[in-house]
Image: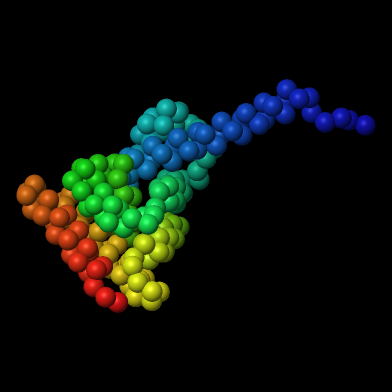
Amino acid sequence: MKLSMPVQELFAMKVSREQMSANRTRILDAASTLFRDRGFDAVTVSEVMKAAGLTHGGFYGHFASKDDLIAQTVTHALTPSDGVGGDLQAYLEAYLSPEHRDRAATGCPTASLASPLRHQSPEARMAMTKGLHSQIDRLADAVPGSDAAERRRAAIGSWAAMVGAVILARAVDDPALSDEVLMQTRAWIDETSRKPV
């Protein structure tokens, strides 16, 4: 009767799986940054792999195609790492700030990726849909009020205004207008959220 694999072989397999997982995360992180900064079409698989510090040949061990990479990157980027928490005002101030506007490559993936996603695969759009549901739910939990339907409505309106403001603030070449868009959107959301429901 054959006994189980030697301990060294089992350890080597575990390290390989752990390394595969770490490499995959490196690829997704690199793709997320590049896609947010330059868009899906302007970034090649070779550039993603180079940014991840890996060879191009290893790509297909992780992803079936660039479309698969895009869909999985959207899921990865929209997985909540931090939330609104209980302080909606602090979240608004951070999100609608010049600092956030100026760091598209590491800022909100929704503001960077939503528009070009309409041209991507159904899987990528499904990932965005799931991320949007999650963000709306997190915002609805932070919006004041007792009526769930009204809080959800306020969350959808606020998130749409926030994302739209960042997109517009990044698009214009007038710094004063860009700052004004962020400031006035923040003021409008703040004023709207204080109205009795």
Task: Examine the image and state in which quarter residue 1 appears.
Answer: top right
List x then y, in percent, for residue 150. 34, 75
Asked if one can make out residue 158 in the rendered structure from this viewpoint, the answer is yes
Residue 124 to residue 136: above or below: above
List x then y, in percent, for residue 75. 44, 51
Picture residue at 45% right of the left edge, 28% below the top = 55
Picture residue at 14% right of the left edge, 59% below the top = 184
How has the structure been colored for display? rainbow
State left or right for residue 82 relative to residue 188. right
Q: Residue furthest right?
A: 1
Picture residue at 25% right of the left edge, 41% below the top = 103
Q: In which quadrant of the rendered image does the C terminus lie? A: bottom left
Task: Examine the image and state in which quarter residue 30 appears.
Answer: top left
- Is 77 or 196 nearer to us in this picture? 196
Task: Examine the image and state in which quarter residue 105 appears.
Answer: top left
The total number of labels drawn is 0
List x then y, in percent, for residue 74. 41, 51
State left or right for residue 9 relative to residue 80. right
- Is 49 or 155 nearer to us in this picture? 155
Asked if one can make out residue 122 in the rendered structure from this viewpoint, the answer is no
Picture residue at 39% right of the left edge, 55% below the top = 85
List x then y, in percent, for residue 90. 28, 52
Residue 131 to residue 82: above or below: below
State left or right for residue 195 relative to residue 19. left
